[in-house]
Every structure is written in structure tokens, then in C-alpha cells.
Amino acid sequence: MTVRGLWIISHENGGNLSIRFSRRFSTVEHRAKSLAGSSYVAVPEESTFLQLLLTELGLSDSGKNYVALRDDCLYRPRSPALELHVDGPAKGILWPVLTVSQGPLILACLPLVDVPPDPRPPLASLLSVSQGLTLLAGLQTFLLGSGSKPDSEGLGSRLAMVPSVLLQVCPLGTPLDVPLPGTPTAPTSVGTQKQPAWKTGLHRGRAVVNVGLIETVRSMQYGNRSRQDLWDVYVTLSLPPNGSPLQDILVHPCVTSLDSSILTASSVDNYDGSAFSGPYKFPFSPPLEPFRLCSYTSEVPVPPILGSYQLKEEENQLRVSVTLKLHESIKNSFEFCNAHLPFFNRDQMGVVDMKVSSGQLDVSKEKNLLVWVLGQKFPKSREVTMEGKINFSGPTPGPSDPLCTKLTAYVKLHFKVPDMTLSGCYVDQHSVQVYSSAKPRIVTSRELQSKEYYIWNSTGTAPVSSGQMMM
Amino acid sequence: MAANWAERISAFSRRPSGFLSGTTAEAFLAELLRELRDDRATYSVKILLLSPLCEHPTLLCCSDSVGEETALELMSVFAQCPPKSVQFRCHLLLALTSVLICTSCVKSHSRASLDFLDVLLQIAQDTSDIHTDGSQRPLRAIACECLRELEACCPGLLSQRLELLGGLWQQETSRLHQAYAELYTLVLRNAIYQLTQETGAGAEHLKALLGGNTSAAWEADQESGLASSKDSAILSSLILGPMGTVPTLHTGPDCKELRSVLSTLLDESYLLTPLCQATLLHRLTEVVAMVPGVPPAIFRTHLLRLLGTSEVSLLHATLLLKCAFTDSLFSSEDEAFILKRLVVLSQHLLLSTPEKLFYMDCILHFPENRPISCGDGDETLPVLLTPQLASALVPTVFNDSATLLARFNMLSLVYLEEGEEGQGGQGLAYLYEHLSSLLSMVENGCGRELVVTFFRAAFLFLYYFCHVERYSNDLTKQLCQLYLNHTKLAPHFINLADQTQDRLSESSWSVGLLKALQRVITEAPLTQLTSHDLSRHLKMLARVAEEGEIIQQSTLTFLSSIITPSSSSLCTGGDWRLGNEILRVCRHLLVHPSLDSLLTPLADVLQLLVCHYADMEIQDHARLYYTLLTTLSREKLAGVLAQGMEEGGRQDKKQSLSCLIGEGLTSTLTIQQTERAVFRLIEAPPEPRAGDINSNEVQKGPEEASASMEAYRDQFSDSSFASEITLQYQLVHINSHDSHFDQLFSIRLHFSLTDHHYEELGDISVPCLLRERPSAIVQLTLKPRKPYPTSLHASAIFTSPDGHTWHTTLPDIHVAFQQTFLPLPVPSNWGRGGTLSVFEGLWDEICSESGDSAMSLFCCQLKEAALNTLVEKHFLPFLISDASHKEEFKVLFFLPPRSHILLKVSSEEDAVHFNIATDNWELLSHVNSYLLKITSL
């Protein structure tokens, strides 16, 4: 339940990876020594550690085609726990080194193995592993922000804050918490009731409960009978009432109790019509910062936009035909809706002779991507088409991609529909009960957005993306 | 100064060993402590100064007593530090904890550690700030954390304070209750563990423990408890899966007190951060496992909340709970539910990749209620994981490498179990299709990472399904095609062949692959072959030639056609590297079991090389092979060449004649590091000084004192004059070392300085060092900037008889002060008179001048005889006055570059007086210790 050391690695200005911060926890090391006995392997010095880690991550010697240590085909589970092969006088295998990486940052820690080391115990028997992962993820969020785009601008200044953050969350190697976004407000003592340790203080200001419901739809459409199309939905943050059954519900730790019927539905089960269909109630005591109360998945009978994509190779040009159909149950009012048609492993586009029935068509600056801007509305018919020919006669080759060769190609849809969900799930304003002396305002919202929404060319081969398709 | 400290501290933590080689641990520690006491230093610098003590306490405190002293120092710093510098006080507590634990002071109950424990307990109990600003709260939190760490490292330390800690936990309403709860549960767990080790301990003892009534009942137990804490078992987790045994405390069903404590802890656990909740849950799991009187059902009301959580550590703690109590807490429906949950989590979009991979690992080590295997740490599939359920985890090309391989591995296990019929067959077909699509991505020229991933996936597939020939044969075919289009993947192919051969000893797939590769290489038209391709082909063929089962005729035909100028122009350039690659193939063929049938074509190929290859060296080697082939019997040939190839197979890097080219090249070109020092330098016994100026009685040189001085001074206009000292050392073996290093050749010694008092030294070569022969003499020429004693680091590169090159480190060489002495550098034809007048001249100058000059007096008790011996032994080369003139000896040490030490030694009535004069006062302390040393002998 403890880590022996912690390392933060990132690109220096020059581009080389270097250790920007490291901390060893000597008292934990002391324990590690007595726990491991003769199989104890000391943590090597920084430069050695870095070099071994990069080799294991496959990041060393990037100029070389094949390096035996790095590229050996023998399979060992490398992630999330790596083995570092320490050479020299303190020879041995350092395990399990946990790593997480995102953007310019690699974080690593070495959990204490508190069970007999021989034979090597499974990761699952070491609680310190999941705790180490949580600590690393928390530090990563602290350093880069939680958005999808890592914010590496303020990285330097946040790195400088790491020592004082660690004093709070992991002073002696035992992770107590993840770094909190704000600094704790002045402590308060409120009566005899114990304050949750994860609450940073008291909220000052207007009492507002803001419940947002975001459903994200993924889709893989092949336009091909032998391959079934696929779509599913997941949601972040919600208080779902009656509606189509919600599955795989995961809740935030601030939820104090759960009903068993809420948890039973699972996407990996065979669906038996008897599933619980709500209402889903979550009693909780909210932290001050925005948080993800729960997430769910749901199976809906139709995709919101059904597409068909067909390519035909003709001499030096491609004949393109795309049709998109908006399902009648979907509100025809988008915040935005774009279709992207990238072309890989070809020269740049030359003459683009395309007609669209609605919206407008742009060619990207790099001349390898068509962007079809559909705007806020589909036409009344709820169907749009694009037809035409593209000539690839540009002077330089476009980008390459190992997957999208020949006629393997896709249309990727990006859209967002406010005030609607696919599953029909919603949060009833009146059902939000707040037990508090302050009468908070309650705001709820819903939205549907796309992610990984692909329509594959039906005249080419398309990659399989899920196992459910074959069973 | 502050910036300097930041730099030094970061240099230390980057490379402690390197940092400490420039100074000593004692000195650095003393510096740190001095600076910590300095009022002028800011607290932010002081916090920085504590980090070496936190991170590497044992490097700085080399012994427990140093640790104890350091701790006492830090405690007095703590006592003097104003309460408002909370941050610094927090770091002080952490540093103290680190020092005391790591130097074993806590274990031995040293003074300082007991005092520190009192300080911590005092802080933990001090809630006086609660109604003011709560500014001391971070300090209290850190104090609790330090107590927890002390208890974790020395289990049982706080057992007697259990009630006190329980009270603190219950009273606290601020966020700090978490720190108390963590501390309390750990102490409780350790105390109960200790009770389980006592014979006859039972319900009464448990009650007494919780009530704080630790008087007579087990005062004695305490000692033995601490004794047992030397055993690391108490530090280990007690939840070990089906094979683990947990020590138990037999209390009968009546343990109300414990049960109520546990319920309260559990009920309030949701107030803790998920990480602390997980720890708490794990500790309580251990407690309930140790006390059968408390039913595991105590956890039941919390299970739903825990199973629904999105927090990895909480769910993990719940899995460990299942591991501990299996069906006494979890029904089979629960089990099925948890497994499904793990499958869902292993592919959940909102979780990070490491978390998902961790969950997959949890599936492969699932704590089943009724496990079939004994859970020896190997990956096994839970019975409930059906192909249907696992299909959620099939690998796809959209996965990242790690996920892809982990899924590939798991699904392989699933389909292996299912067999080739039914769903297993379908699944297997899917896996193969997936492998093919990876292959076509490699074919299309993807990045390095994907290439490696493909080969790993291919290995996995073969590992599980090599016996399914329909797939493994097809894979061979596809791989050959891939190789022809991407010859740069040759090392990957060789690696795949090697690993499948090693791991799948039953299967001949690897040989089949190599055979097929040999065919495609030898059958492809030569016209399109580039020299890059050829070099890779040759590597491949060399590997093929290692296989005795593979017929090599086609390889030889291929070799002969590429060397023959009329059929190919590839070798006309006479590229040395390419030639070596051809020779490497030939060498493997020379030891091939079917050599008899290869004799003529191989001889032809070697002849071709001798005649047509444009590189002289390649011709020579080919000629050598040809001679060996045509003159030696098969057995002898194998003996000459195979030594090293046979024993260790491919990896072996032993030396033999032919290995000098071929793979031996790498090991001869690499420098290896010796594990320990092999030899060292010791001071050589002094040679009798020939041509000593004192023995020469010719009275020459300037008559007048002033003229002598001038002539003497003039010599120094040449800056290199008398600027060097030459020291004689013997290079000797360090005893009791392995015989491998008895004979060493071409030794090159390299020296590096540890200070700035000397100029850099050049390397020194020693032709050989043989253990049975007299040791080699090494002359070290030092050029001082300041003639102080010093140490030199020395290292060496040498060759051992087997041709390997080694690097070794020698023990440091210490240059003593007296080794820097030289006799007065005057022209050799000067007699005593000249030197004497220089002596007098210098003496007078020093007496009259101030500046850097100094006079001093050293006295000691010596009998006359002893004094004479001393002069004889130490001063003779430096004696200026006549040796027979025993009333007063005049001695002059010259120290390059231009310092002088003059001694007038005379026996007075009470003692021997050494009157010292020097033109460099900084040398006085060294002179003093030198005189002390020689006179006390």
C-alpha cells in the first residue's frame, strides 16, 4: 500500500527525455529490504533508471531498427507493470514499475511488494499497484489538466509545485489522496459531524446543483451484410430516471449507497428483457469541484445517423459517393455536424469535382482531407448526399497510414445535439432532492455527442473493431 | 548561496555516489546540519536541505550512532523553530522519521527515537488550535503520518497507545479524522497480529488491548512481540489467496468490543479518500481474517457501494476481500457479477489504459470461490469466463500495443481451452485473421512499434496454437512474403525463430520457417538484389546454416552465384563488411553436420573468395578456412571451430580462432567491466639515491651567499624547472582473485584528480603484469599547483589472455605530504657551501619578510640516538648541513612548484626543537602533522 519511489519524466526543451522530478521514500525502501530478503534489488540512480525504463517502454535508441533488449518478441505483460533489468553489482529485476504516459509526460512509480517475492506474485495481489496507478493518474491530471488536450504550457510551474503537493498527498510513500485542483480553503469545524476527508472545505457562494447529462455515441458502419454495424452509447455524469435500461453503471466514491438492481445490467451479458429500467437513484454527498457522479452504457436500436460510403478506383481518380440519413427519432437541430473524409497513402488531391446536396465542402490546406460541413440542420428529407470524383495529382505525397491502404477508407462524423439523449435518459429537475438548509437552484441539461463515429467504405476491406460482431 | 545549495542538492539526488566521491558523507552531513542551524538561511532553502536526509538517510548517516546524533541535532532544530513555519516543521518531522527508521534507531529504542515518539504523540494530541485558525493542522496530519510509518516499519511500537489513538480518531471532526483512522487501524492490526503469536492469548487479551488496559496481562508480551517484529512476516500482507495461511486468534464468538470498533470504522469509511478507504478496507480484511470470532458478514452492507465504484483501488480492495473470505462472504451469483464487472471495466471507455490492463490482470488471477488450480501465480482462466463473455475483449487494430497484446494473450487462453471445435475454432479463426491484418499493416510499412507488436503477437499465436498446422503453415508462407518485401526486418525474423525454438522445443515450426526463408532467399532473382538486401540475406542464411536439419546446398549455390563476378556485380566492390558476412555463413557451414556432402561446393565458394574477392583480409580468412577445410579431419575441424558454438549455441561469445571475425568481433570490441578490483598500485621501496649532492665534496659554485641566491632564483625563470615530482609505484595483483586474471597485457592506467591542487596526469602504459613475475614499476609524474597531500582515482583498461578487453577500477592512490618533498634543486656541481648559502639566504628572507612566510617551532621529547635515527631515516636526502655536525641539523624540503620548508633541528636541554621556516604559511599545518607522525614513531 506504499510506493518506494516516484519519477516524473518529460521532454526537455531539446527533445530529450529526462527526469524532471524524482522522490525516493527511504523508510519504504527500508521495509522493502526486509520484506524481499535476499531477492532485494535496490532502486538504481536516476540516469540508470531512466535508461532502463525507456528501453522497456521501447523509447530508447529510436534511430535503430532493432535492439535486442527493446524489441524481443518474447511476450511478457509489460504494461502496466514493467520489469527493469538492473545490471552491475546490484544485479536483479526491479518489478513492478508502474507507468502512465500522456503527451509530453511519463510518470512512474515502484510499489512495495508486501507479499513473499518468490515466486513472483500476481499484480492483483498487491493493493499498492492499484493505489500507485491512482496516484500516478492523479499527478498526471494535476500536471496536464483533465482535458483531452494536454496543457503542457504551465507544466514547468506545476512541476515546481510537486514537492509541496506530495507533502500533502504522499509524504512518506503511502498515497493518501490525489492532488486536488484547488488549495484547501480555510478549515472549519462544523458541530460534531465528521467532515469527509475529500471535501476541501466549505462552499462559499450561491448554492447551485448543476446536473449535466452527456451521452456519447460511437459507431462503426460497414455498409456490408456480412458485417453487422455497431453502435453503443456511454454517458458521463447523470442522474438517470426511467428510460431504456442503463448498463455498466460506475459511480463516484461520494455515492453513499447503491441499490443492487441498478448494478446488475451489463453490456457483456445476453440481454434478457427483464432488466431494471429505473428510476436510478444515487444518494451522495457532493465534493465542491465538478465531478463525474456516474457513467453508464446503453444499447439503442438504431444509430442516430446511418451512412453509406462507396469508393471506386477509376484510372487516376476516385469516384466517391456518400449518403447520410438522420434517424427520425433524432432532433434535427445540431450544435454542429461535420463529416471528415481523409485520404491516406495517396498523393495530394488535385482536381476535386464534388457535388453535395446540402451544406458546404472544404478541402483542407494539406490537400488530403475533405471536410463536409453540414451545419445545424439536415434538410426536410433528413437525407444528404455527396457525389463526385477526386483526382490525386498533387505534387507531394499525402500522409501515410498503415491501416487505410487501397480502398480501406472511412468517413468520420463529428456532431453534437443539445438537449437530447439517445437512450431517452434524462434528469428530472424535481427529482433532485437536496438535504440542506440552503435552497439551491437546480439546473439540468442533456446533450448527445459523437466520438469515433466511423462509416467505412463498403467496397474495400474494413478492420474489425469489436468481438461482438463475430459471435 | 541559496542557488548553490539548490544545485548541490539536486546533484546529490541525481547521483548520490558521484556526489559523495567528491566529498565525504560526514562532511556533507556536517555542512547540511550547520546550514540548518544557520539563522540567515531561508526556510525554503532549509526544506531543500532536508531532502537528502529524507531520501538517502543511510548514505549520510553511515552508522546508527551517527543517525542518533543527527536525529538529536534535528530535534533541537525543531525545538528552536518558531511554530509558524509549519512547512519546515513538517519536513523536519519527515526527515527525523526517515533517519530514525533507516538507521535502526527506532528498532533499538534509542534515546532519540523515544524522544521523537513523545514529540509526535504530543503534536498528535495537541488540538489547541482547533478553535483558532487551524494553522497547525498540517503539522498534526504529518505527525500522524510519521507515527503510522514508524508503526509500519516497527510493528507493535504503538500497541500500548491503542486506546489513546482510538479516542483521538473518534473525537476529531475535521478532515484529520482520516489520518487518525489510518493510524488506528494499522496499530490495531499489528497488535492483533502480535496476540496471534502469543500462546494462550484470547478474548480477554483482545478486550484488554482495546480498553487500553495493557498492564500486567501482557507487559511481558510486549518484549516478545517486538522480538517477532524482526521477522518480516508481520510486514507482509496477510491476504495471499487460496494457499496462504493467516495466523488466527481464538476468541470464541464474544468479541463485541472489536466488532463495534470495526463497524464504526466501516460505517465511517466513506468519509475517507478512496485511496485511504482502500487501505483501511484491506487492514480490516486482515483483522477479520485473523479473528474468526468476527464474521466476514460485517462487510456485507458495504459491498454494493464498493462493487459499483469507478475507483480502481476500491474495487481492488474488494477483490482482495473476496480473496480472503471467498464463499463465506460472496455467493456464486456475486462471483459471476464481479467477473462480468471486471470484463466491462477491462474495456471501459472512461478508464485509462493502465487501469484497463490492470483489470485484465485481475481476470487472469481472479479469486475464485472454488479454484481448481492452486493459484501458484500463473495465469489461469476463471471457470466463469466463457468465450461469449470474453468476446468483449477481442483484440482489434484500434487497440494500443499493450492492450492488443494483453487481449491477444487472454483470448488465446480462452480459445485454447475451448478447443478447435465450435466457438473455440471460430475464435481461433478470428485471432488468426487479426494477426493477418497486423501483418498486412507491417507489409504496408508501419512504424517500429507496430512491427514489434506484430512479432510479439505472432509469437503469442505460435506459443498457443503452433500445433494447428493450417494456421502455422500459412503464417510461415505469409512471413516469407513479408521478408522478401521488407528485408530490413531480418533481425526480427531471427529473433522470432530463436524464441520459438527455445520456448516450443516440441515443435519444428522454427526450422520450417528458416527452411522456407532459405528457399525464398535463394530462389529470388539476383538482378533485383541490392547490397542492403544481400547483407540481410546473409545474416539470415548464417542463422539457417546453424540448423543441422536443413540442407545447405542451395545456400552454397546462392553464395557462389553472388561471388562469381559474371553472375552478379554485388561483390565486385570488395566490401569488407559484406565479405565478413559471407565468411560467417561459411563458418557455420564448416561445422554443419552434413559437411561431407558440402565439401566440394563449400571449397569452391572459399576458392572463389580467395581468387575474386577484392578485400585482402577477406581473401586471407577465406584461405584460412579453405586450408582448414581441406587439411583437417572433420573432427578436428569441428574441434577448432565449434568450441563455443556447440556449448552455448547462438548466444555464446567464446573466443576461437575464427570468432575473431564473425560474432566474436563484438565481444572483442566491447570493453567489459570487472566485478572487483584486479590490481592496485603500492608505493615502491625507495631506491638508494645516487649522485647525492652531499656526497660530492667539490667546492664549486658561487662564493658569496647573495650570488648563490641569485643563481638559484634564476633557475625558476624556466617555468618547467623543478616543477614535477616523480613517485615510484609497484603494480601488483590484489590477492585471492580468480586465476582468469593471472596474466594481463597492454595495461593502460588512467588517473583522475580529486581536487584542483595538481595538474591533470597523462595515461601510463604497462606492457604486462604476470602474477608469478616481479611486479611492474610505474612512475607517476605529478605536477603540483599546490603541494598538498591528495588522492587520485585510478582506472585501467587491459587485455586478458583470452583476448577480451576489460575495464577495472583500482583502489585510490594516496599521495602523502612527504612524497611531495624534493631536495633543493641546485645545479649538480654545487657543493655543500652553495646549498648552505641558499639555505641561509632563504632563512633570512623568511625571517625578515611577512606575507606568505611564516616561522614556527615544534618541540618534542627525543633521546639523542633517536634523533639521529630520525634524521638518518627521514631527512638524509634533504640535509643541508654536514651529517656529522650534530648540534644543529639544517634540513630543506623543496616543494614544487616553488615552496620551501626549512628546518633547524637542535637538541636543547628540555626537548628537541624543530625551528621551522617556510615561505608558504599554508603548509604549516601539514608540516606539523608530518613532524608529529615521524617523531611519535
Image: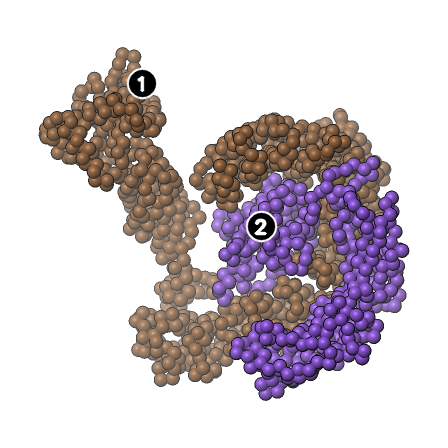
Numbered mark located on residue B859 in the image: 1
Please, is residue B907 above or below residue A136 in the view?
above
The three-letter code of the residue at mark 1 reads Cys
Q: Chain of mark 2?
A: A
Residue at x 21%, y 17% (from the top left corner): B887
What is the distance, in whole Å, between disc 1 and disc 2 at their CAs?
Answer: 63 Å
Please, is residue B281 above or below residue B68 in the view?
below
The three-letter code of the residue at mark 2 reads Gly
Depth order, front residue of A261/B240: A261
Depth order, front residue of B69/A445: A445
Left or right of A157 on screen, residue A281: right
Q: Do callouts 1 and 2 point to residues on the same chain?
A: no
| SS class, disc 1 | strand
Q: Position of residue A302 (x, y in %)?
A: 80, 73
Left or right of A47 on screen, residue A430: right
| SS class, disc 2 | helix
Q: Position of residue B711 (x, y in %)?
A: 16, 33
Residue at x 80%, y 54% (from the top left corner): A210
Residue receiving disc 2:
A156
Q: Chain B hue?
A: brown
Q: Position of residue A22 (x, y in %)?
A: 57, 47
* Residue A121 seen from this side: no
Left or right of A86 on screen, residue B665: left
Residue at x 56%, y 58% (from the top left corner): A56
Q: Position of residue B676 (x, y in %)?
A: 43, 46
Q: Nearer the viewer, mark 1 or mark 2?
A: 2
Q: Quadrant of the C terminus of chain B?
A: top left
Q: Chain of mark 1?
A: B
Q: Chain A hue?
A: purple
Quarter holding residue B455? bottom right
Q: Residue furthest top?
A: B909
